[in-house]
Image (cartoon, rainbow, N blue to C red):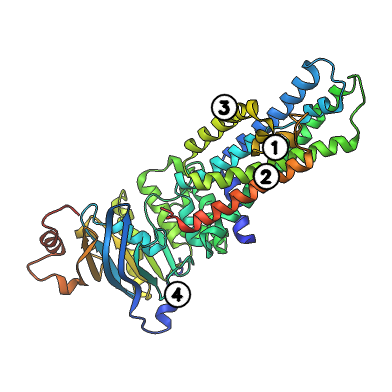
């Protein structure tokens, strides 16, 4: 497994798309910190202040999706499977793990950047200041959302196998279908991977789920999608 | 590539079949691409796999590689149903399977790590296929012939006992074709097996020992070149007679 993970990590590090996503995620984190902390008026509640630290996990989901689906588009999945010495499901599991690890690295850099920007900007806002524990909690939530989103994205990408189709479906679900569902039943939207991830990152509050429950919901989605994608990979032709 | 090394299969003694295809059938929906196909690839031989366009050659080679699952029948490589060991089976089926944004060295490096092979092997296969000077260029900038050579390099990474090549001379210049021909014959001298498809029958006839001809997913003829040809009928003639002139 370590050999496969190392090889898959090497693949993610040797194309430019990983670095583009890194820049995008960090830039969004910093921009969100500036917009929420400096341009949203006075933030006098802890939950409002924590919004300044929120990342955009859907970007990590796109990263996993585009990367994993790209393996089929560029036919790079076949040579990897041919040399691996392991079954395709194990190779895919290693690939998903590689995207999770790279998402963790991207997440750490993004959280560090947004924290460095948000903390000084929030210092003069009224109400209770954020404690170190509250900042650590929101940072951990963001990291968990990033990693789990990358796992979901890679699993979906491996099943869809066509990056453009996957991206379009993901964006339509996130920005069109879920808002409609939320309008009818907010609790249902919170149980979706996007809704639960938003609770984890604190980009939304006054929700029906606690942060802990939201973490479990996102983790359940990630595990379920990974299992289905591995089972699918073992059954389908690769070329 | 260590051209002096004998392959384990050769050293272990005669093993008549490197690849065995038994009753292979592959359907996509209602379309039958390969229909109850059976043949064997002799160990240590260079076997040409020929057929008109759409005959099912690539599907058969993908089944040999384990990339597509047979609807019925089975494929054995060295007696095993599933082989993903680059030391046993090397495969190049178009396209080359490299990300266009990755360099050739990075592509082969990742494959070497995945395979548990030494990274030094990357330089060796790049030199073997004549890509060492272009190794740091992104694959997206490569010509068709260079991508073919990169695919061949990936297939040779584990110095495999059995090499499967689908249209390996497509896009290659005369020098590269000559280099490939020499490489395949040297492998055969060491006891390694090669199964290759080609549209260029006259070129293939120069290096193959055995021939398998299929059409519409079915076997038309299999045997040694000597068995199939005569002083008056070339491989090209035999092929056209069997396939009623459909282009290879």
Q: In the figure, residue A23 lies in which quadrant?
A: top right
| Residue identified by numbered label 4 | B5
**Contact check, label 1 and label 2, Cβ < 8 Å:** yes
| Distance Cα–Cα, label 1 vs label 2 | 9 Å
Q: Secondary structure at mark 3?
A: helix
Q: In the figure, residue B189 lies in which quadrant?
A: bottom left
| Residue identified by numbered label 1 | A197
Residue B206 visible at all = yes
Q: Are marks 4 and 3 on the same chain?
A: no
| Distance Cα–Cα, label 2 vs label 4 | 48 Å
Q: Residues within 10 Å of mark 1 (few under 14, many from 20)?
A: many
Please state which of the two labelled residues, at mark 4 or mark 3, is closer to the viewer. Answer: 3
In-image side of A156 versus B13 (left or right): right
**B125 and B225: which is toward the camera:** B225
Residue A148: which numbered mark, if any?
2
Please state which of the two labelled residues, at mark 2 or mark 4, is closer to the viewer. Answer: 2
């Amino acid at each position: 497994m370590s050999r496969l993970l190392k090889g898959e990590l090497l693949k993610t590090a040797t194309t430019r798309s990983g670095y583009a996503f890194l820049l995008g995620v960090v830039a969004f984190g910093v921009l969100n910190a500036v917009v929420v902390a400096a341009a949203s008026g006075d933030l006098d509640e802890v939950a409002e202040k924590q919004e300044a630290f929120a990342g955009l996990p859907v970007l990590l989901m796109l990263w996993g999706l585009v990367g994993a689906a790209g393996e089929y588009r560029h036919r790079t999945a076949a040579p990897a499977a041919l040399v691996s010495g392991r079954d395709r499901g194990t190779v895919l599991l290693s690939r998903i793990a590689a995207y999770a690890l790279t998402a963790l690295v991207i997440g750490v850099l993004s959280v560090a950047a947004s924290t460095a920007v948000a903390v000084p900007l929030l210092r003069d806002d009224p109400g209770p200041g954020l404690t170190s524990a509250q900042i650590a909690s929101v940072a951990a939530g963001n990291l968990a959302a990033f990693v789990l989103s990358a796992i979901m994205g890679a699993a979906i990408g491996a099943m869809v196998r066509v990056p453009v189709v996957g991206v379009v479906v993901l964006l339509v679900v996130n920005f069109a279908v879920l808002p409609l569902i939320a309008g009818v039943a907010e609790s249902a939207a919170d149980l979706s991977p996007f809704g639960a991830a938003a609770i984890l990152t604190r980009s939304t509050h006054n929700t029906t789920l606690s942060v802990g429950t939201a973490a479990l919901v996102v983790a359940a989605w990630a595990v379920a999608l990974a299992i289905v994608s591995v089972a699918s990979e073992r059954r389908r032709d690769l070329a | 590539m260590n051209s002096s090394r004998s392959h384990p299969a050769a050293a272990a003694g005669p093993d008549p079949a490197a690849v065995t295809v038994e009753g292979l059938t592959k359907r996509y929906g209602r379309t039958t691409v390969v229909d109850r196909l059976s043949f064997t690839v002799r160990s240590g031989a260079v076997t040409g796999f020929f057929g008109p366009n759409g005959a099912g050659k690539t599907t058969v080679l993908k089944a040999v590689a384990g990339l597509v699952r047979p609807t019925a029948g089975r494929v054995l490589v060295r007696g095993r149903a599933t082989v993903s060991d680059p030391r046993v089976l090397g495969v190049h089926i178009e396209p080359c399977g490299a990300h266009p944004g990755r360099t050739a060295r990075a592509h082969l490096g990742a494959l070497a790590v995945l395979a548990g092979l030494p990274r030094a092997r990357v330089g060796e296969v790049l030199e073997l296929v004549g890509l060492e000077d272009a190794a740091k260029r992104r694959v997206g900038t490569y010509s068709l012939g260079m991508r073919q050579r990169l695919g061949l390099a990936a297939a040779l990474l584990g110095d495999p006992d059995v090499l499967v090549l689908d249209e390996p001379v497509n896009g290659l210049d005369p020098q590269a074709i000559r280099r490939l021909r020499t490489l395949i014959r040297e492998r055969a001298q060491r006891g390694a097996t090669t199964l290759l498809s080609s549209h260029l029958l006259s070129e293939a006839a120069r290096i193959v020992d055995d021939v398998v001809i299929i059409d519409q997913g079915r076997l038309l003829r299999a045997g040694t070149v000597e068995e199939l040809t005569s002083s008056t009928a070339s491989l090209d003639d035999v092929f056209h007679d069997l396939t009623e002139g459909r282009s290879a």
